[in-house]
Image (spheres, rainbow, N blue to C red):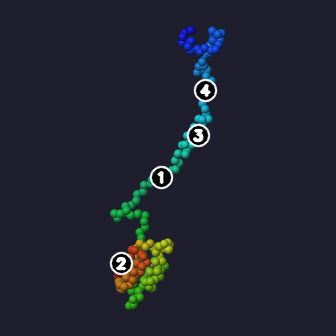
Amino acid sequence: MTLLARARRTPDSAAPENGGAYHRPLSRRHRSESDLRLNLVSMIDVVFLLFMYFLLTANFTLGEEVYLIDVPQTRAAGFDDPFELPERPLTIRIATIGPGAADCSIRIDLPGLAPTPTFEDLFRRLEDHRVRPGNPTGLFMPDNPIHIVPTAGTRWEHTIEALNACLRAQYTSVRLIEPAAGG
């Protein structure tokens, strides 16, 4: 027996000198079956933990869509809203009908409104139709354009009274339009 073979053997308490046999260490082929098993319970736990991690960190919302729209270019240099409707001005027509200071006809171009007899009535109607905190259902914003259109024979004081009624009703965009010829 060689020295190497003797070194590999481990003497047991019953060595051949003592009448016993040598004890050989177990080789890899002879190891117990429990050493070769995988612990499947812990593997399943790890798989479920990874599954929960990816499930909770995933983003299931749809991405935001981008649509290209060709918007027509405006003629103005500024950036106007192409979907905004143009503001139609409120037109007030004034005509002098007699020699007195109160002899005038005041007509607001709104469907269903009769002519107003006085400038105080004009003020009340304009104030009733203005949008404000106490009247959110009004027809006109304070910056809505108002055009005062006198006839050719209208006296200047009637035109100025109509202008004052609009300003007292707190409208900010009031214009005097050149008198129409013929009335």
Front tag of 2 and 3: 3
Front tag of 2 and 1: 1
**Separation of residues labelled 4 and 3 (CA atoms):** 25 Å
Q: Residue furthest bottom?
A: 99
Identify the residue position indicated by label 3 in the image: 48
Identify the residue position indicated by label 4 in the image: 35
Query: Against 36, is 57 above or below?
Result: below
User: What kind of element bears circle 4?
Assistant: helix
User: What kind of element bears circle 2?
Assistant: loop
Query: Against 154, is 60 above or below?
Result: above
Q: Residue furthest right?
A: 19
Horizontal and vertical percent for residue 178?
34, 79
Who's the residue at 61% across and 20% down the image? 30
Badge 2 or badge 1: first in the primary sequence: 1
**Separation of residues labelled 3 and 1 (CA atoms):** 32 Å
User: What kind of element bears circle 1?
Assistant: loop
Residue neighbourhood size for the residue with mark 4, other residues' Cα within 10 Å, grouped as few (<14), some (14–19), many (≥20):
few
Of 133 and 9, nearer the camera is 9
Q: Amino acid at mark 2?
A: Ile
Horizontal and vertical percent for residue 122?
44, 81
Identify the residue position indicated by label 2 in the image: 177
